[in-house]
Image: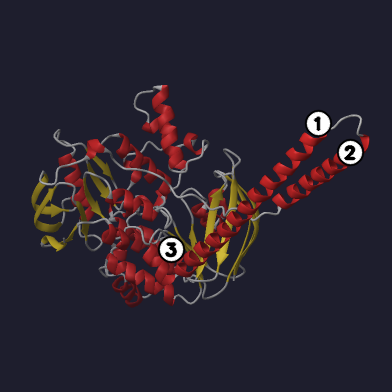
Amino acid sequence: MLQISKLTLTHKRDLRTILSDFNMVLNYGDKAVMIGEEGNGKSTLLKWIYNSEMTEEYIEAEGERYSGKERLAYLPQELEQENRSKTLYEFFSSKAGFFDLSPKELAALSRKFQLDEGFFYSEQKMESLSGGERIKAQLMAAFMEQPTVLLLDEPSNDIDIDTLELLEKMINDFPYIVLFISHDEVLIENTANMIIHIEQVQRKTRSRYTIAHCSYAEYVKNRQDLFAHQEQLAQNDRREKAIRDEKYRKVYESVAKALSSCSKQAPAVAKNLKDKMHTVKAMEKRFERENAEMTEMPEQEEAIFFKLGNKESEIPNGKTVLEYSLDELRTPDNEKILARDIFLRIRGAEKVCIIGRNGCGKTTLLKKIAESMLQRDDIRVEYMPQTYENLLDINATPIDFLDTTGEKADRTRIRTYLGSLKYTADEMEHPIGELSGGQKAKVLLLKMSLSKANVLILDEPTRNFSPLSGPVIRKMIAAFPGAVISISHDRKYIDEVSTVVYELDERGLTLIAE
């Protein structure tokens, strides 16, 4: 059992409460997913549960965690800095459980994750692995600890569709406790039997959470039904109030008018009118009490609002945006050929998505395409890499990073845009390095929009967005009037955004959907 009791998390920098009086009990068999908008404290909570020291630098915590003899294993959203320069062998040998496994057991584990049996002993550095390979390595390391509680922060990031299906099976088959954060709506729908929804309402001034023991689809439906019912009751109350207030106004005005015109020579009439006015005012006080008991309008965290691109981003349907050919695609160290005879043509406002197994070279190819297209002056290109820190200044604030002029009007406009992406005034002044992965992604997307680009090159664009923001992001990219070249393993993104889908393997690019 894992129990959290009366936990309150407060951000030290701006004293904002990101979680208030949180209580949770997880038992064996629970597959609990944490959902909520970016920056709501999900990753912080997961870190605190695993090791409270990981959050001490920026979080003040009050509350208790009870885990007894449970063994906790943690998958971070990003590979820790201290592990990036390690070789695979150094990384795995630092795990206590590694040497408890026989070569046969290690080989079986590598096959399960569709990796070479020598993967554990490789001298390749962790930071040079593909995003999916890094996730696989971290997941295998977590299982080596023989945990009874799995804490997973975006475990589906960057892994291919085959591995996603394997991850779903692993979560469903795990007999103990799984607590995870995920943007992948399909993964959530296929695995979670418990929903923990963390929200920031009233313009991020009040924290609220909901725990529901049901599937994600049931939770969404029940929540929508509840809000619809509450809204109907609230609207009925307000209609009745409007009718009542109008009647009261007419009575009040009638009595007040009669009282003002009453002659001093008619004291009995005046006394009667004063008594009547006293009764009317008493009625008003009763109405005020009734108003306080009215059904409240349902309050839920607003989804982000954002438009990507404008008229200047349009590309005519017949215009050739890209004709790219490559005889050989090699690994960054030039040691291995990943694919041959690559050719890619893009016309107009096509939304192209490249899929393929982890390690097949998708990110390497996309980076090469980006390098080529960024040199051109006939199109305006923006590139979102898989690792945001490659383009972001983590020590700058979002406002400073996005501001290119220093003009007051431009900084005001940037604040407005950040507000539409649900940044608080304080978060706009936080160093980018302190923001969540989703918040960093929002900064890059906003930079793209402000740049007036007409071609976007996106490496896993939905990887750090919540299932609540995900539909908005997908619609936003699908509606972009220019061309999009992307890599994604997000099954909903592939279905809803992509107009052309290619698969990359050693033979090159194969058209699989158009």
User: Where residue 415 sits in the image (x, y, percent)?
Assistant: 44, 33
User: Where residue 310 sits in the image (x, y, percent)?
Assistant: 27, 38
* Numbered badge on residue 95: 3
- Give the class, few, some or many, for how many residues have Cα within 10 Å of label 1's Cα (few <14, many ≥20): few
- Give the class, few, some or many, for how many residues have Cα within 10 Å of label 2's Cα (few <14, many ≥20): some
CA gap between label 2 and label 3 equals 93 Å
Identify the residue at horizontal 88%, vertical 42% (top origin).
Answer: 275
CA gap between label 3 and label 1 equals 92 Å
Drawn side of residue 299 relative to residue 436, left or right:
right
Evaluate if marks 3 and 1 touch, with contact meaning CB atoms under 8 Å apart. Answer: no
- The three-letter amino acid code for the residue at tag 1 is Ser
Quadrant assignment for the C terminus: bottom left
Q: Which tag is nearer the camera, tag 2 or tag 3?
A: 2
* Numbered badge on residue 269: 2
- The three-letter amino acid code for the residue at tag 2 is Val
- Give the class, few, some or many, for how many residues have Cα within 10 Å of label 3's Cα (few <14, many ≥20): some
Secondary structure beneath dot 1 equals loop
* Numbered badge on residue 261: 1
CA gap between label 1 and label 2 equals 11 Å
Quadrant assignment for the N terminus: bottom right
Res 439 seen here: yes
